[in-house]
Amino acid sequence: MSMANNQGESGSSHLANLKRMAYFAAVVETGSFTAAADRMGITKAVVSQQVARLEREFRTTLLTRTTRKVVPTDAGKAFYGRCALILKEAEGAFAELGEVAIEPSGTLRLTAPLDYGISVVVPAITEFTQRYPQCKVDAILSDQSIDLMSGQVELAIRVGWLTDLNVQARQIGAFRQLLVAVSSWHRQVARLKEPRDIEALPFVANTALRDPTRWSFSRNELERQSVVVRPAISLDATLAVREAVLQGAGLSVLPDYAVAKDLDGGQLIRVLPHWGLPSGGVHAVFPAARFRPAKVRAFVDLLEARVGSV
């Protein structure tokens, strides 16, 4: 017989003995095989047979059986003392596991894009830690995607169009792309009639995007125009692009969450507002797994509620 088979049989034997330990403890605590069987929801014959096998395997009499009651021997009393401790620890472990599954706790490790992270995720993190003080959050805000299979994080917030493979995702929101300019450019942009007119103006490109120079506009679901811009400036971060636009460097396409305050405050204006650009999704992305820790579920629910209320 191979060593692997011996190890497998040993593991099975230990598992069987753990079950017999529980049967034995129930007999001692209830004083009879019948009462123990009722407590555990099995037949009296099963309890009796399994305790007998335990005694045979270790060649020790654990119980003295009479017609009126069952009492432990000295060896049985000593064994029961150890059994009670082990079973109590096991019960506590399962109770703790149940609490972990229900109540968020521990450190949540997540990643999000820098711009969306600052604008939306950080406020959600603050609310989350206030609501669940037993939780901590370790967040990586970066426009570089972190591989979820690396084990660095257990949750990623992805903005845009998903390219991850072997992951599970849940859409929690959406965003619009807006063509914007600094408000001092209002005369120049007022003269624009259609998307191809922007080719004559300076443009700030976001090289963090897959195709930062080609944009597809639509109006009334019937008219469509594709525009290829020649950037005056190329930057690799959304917040940097926003700052360049605010400084008057050129037009650009930016997500609504990154420019909402600037538009409300009048620092930026929309360009060609009757022409739209494709919308994108906001997804919570997880490594492939059957179960999610309570902290992950709670944070995603909270973030989704915040995104939906905006």
Image: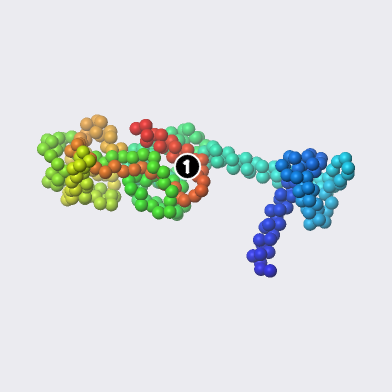
Q: Residue at x 59, y 40 (%)?
A: 98
> Residue 111 appears at what percent x and percent y?
40, 46
Q: Residue at x 55, y 38 (%)?
A: 102
Q: Give the camera-side residue of 134 and 32.
A: 32
Q: Residue at x 47, y 38 (%)?
A: 298
Q: For residue 32, which quarter of the picture?
A: top right
Q: Amino acid at mark 1?
A: Val
Q: Does the rendering let one see residue 299? A: yes
> Residue 163 appears at what percent x and percent y?
36, 52
Position above or below: 11 against 67: below
Point out the image quarter for the N terminus. Answer: bottom right
Q: For residue 181, which quarter of the picture?
A: top left
Residue designated by label 1:
296
> Residue 78 appears at what percent x and percent y?
80, 47
Q: Secondary structure at mark 1?
A: helix
Q: Does the rendering let one see residue 252? A: no
Q: Is residue 159 left or right of residue 250?
A: right
Q: Give the camera-side residue of 97 and 206.
A: 97
User: Are there few (<14), some (14-19), or many (20+) residues within 10 Å of tag 1?
Assistant: many
